[in-house]
Amino acid sequence: MTKQDQLDALKATILEKNVCPELAASATQLVMGDGNPDADIVFIGEAPGQKEDEQGLPFVGAAGKFLNEMLEQAGLVRSDVYITNIVKYRPPNNRDPELEEKREFWPYLMRQLEIIRPSAVITLGRHSGAAFIPDLRISRDHGHARKVRYHEYEFLVIPLYHPAAALYNGSMRQVLIDDFLQAAEAVKRAN
């Protein structure tokens, strides 16, 4: 069974088990992830937004365009990496995902990572960063890599600001780009 087959089976399991039924009822579709199942880097956001819910793909709205731009500056393209979110359904009105929703989706996210086996996870925003680094303060910890262990599997976690932060606050744009380029370098060194 290929990694893609395993990811497809995981998606089918989420649908079959009706994970977060209230969120599922308010969303158009499950947004599982997109990209290379053999990627060295997995990007993890918090939850799909409206555009993602419509298209069934993560990071396709304005924040996704900026993410693509940062990938390009680091010499990468979307097809090199894998992109997903902790929560796989769009919360109503794009609200933040609730703790219980993140908790329900956590085992499925970790299964995604076990299938893909990236050397690094780059979290986008405080919600996904804090899921891996419980004492995370994004303003203090952005761009700083930490090793994380899940069962016998160890990988780097690099928390970054969410790309949307640069859309709301232009001064964050260069911080995000610099952190992103540093993160890409850290992953190259780790490999």
Image (cartoon, rainbow, N blue to C red):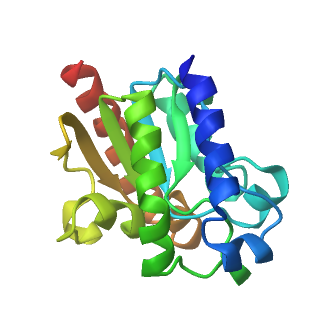
Residue 145 location (% of width, % of height):
19, 45
Residue 123 location (% of width, % of height):
39, 52
Residue 63 relative to residue 85: left or right: right
Asked whether 90 or 21 is in front, the reply is 21
| In this view, 107 is above or below 121 | below
Which residue corresponds to the image point at 78% horizontal and 77% vertical from the top-left? 26
Asked whether 21 or 83 is in front, the reply is 21
Q: Is residue 183 visible?
A: yes
- Quarter occupied by the N terminus: top right
Q: Is residue 77 visible?
A: no
Residue 43 location (% of width, % of height):
46, 44
Residue 127 location (% of width, % of height):
40, 69
Which residue corresponds to the image point at 53% horizontal and 34% vertical from the top-left? 82
Which residue corresponds to the image point at 53% horizontal and 25% vertical from the top-left? 37
Residue 110 relative to residue 75: left or right: left
- Quarter occupied by the C terminus: top left
The answer to which image quadrant residue 89 occupies is bottom right
Residue 165 relative to residue 34: left or right: left
